Amino acid sequence: MKGLFQRSIDNKEKIIIFYMDSNNQVTERYIRVLKLHDNYILAYCYYRKQVRTFKLDNILSAGPIRKGA
């Protein structure tokens, strides 16, 4: 997963993550990773339209966005 996050940083690519929020709700987010840290990522969230912090432990899955989808 960290490879995908690094590629998002390097290529300024938008990716999708499924994230468990503080209320234990699973949310789908489209993000662009800005910085990768040991326990979290700093990313622009297209849903919230602002830079957000996402804990790596709470990211359930992540993947690239398919072209044309």
Image: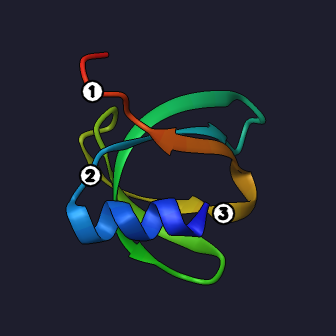
Which residue does the image show at 53% across and 29% down from the upper left?
Answer: 28
Callout 1: few (<14), some (14-19), or many (20+) C-alpha neighbours within 10 Å? few
Report the residue marked by disc 1: 67
66 displayed left or right of 5: left
Across and down, in percent, residue 30 comes to 38, 37
- At a point 71% along the width and 29% down the height, the residue shown is 25
Q: Report x, y in % for residue 12.
A: 21, 59
Checking the image for residue 13, the label placed there is 2
Image quarter for residue 45? top left
Q: Is residue 48 left or right of residue 16?
A: left
SS of the residue under disc 3: helix
Find residue 56 and name its label: 3
Q: Nearer the viewer, residue 30 or 47?
A: 30
Residue located farthest toward the bottom when viewing the structure as drawn: 38
**Cβ–Cβ under 8 Å for marks 2 and 3:** no
Q: Amino acid at mark 1?
A: Lys
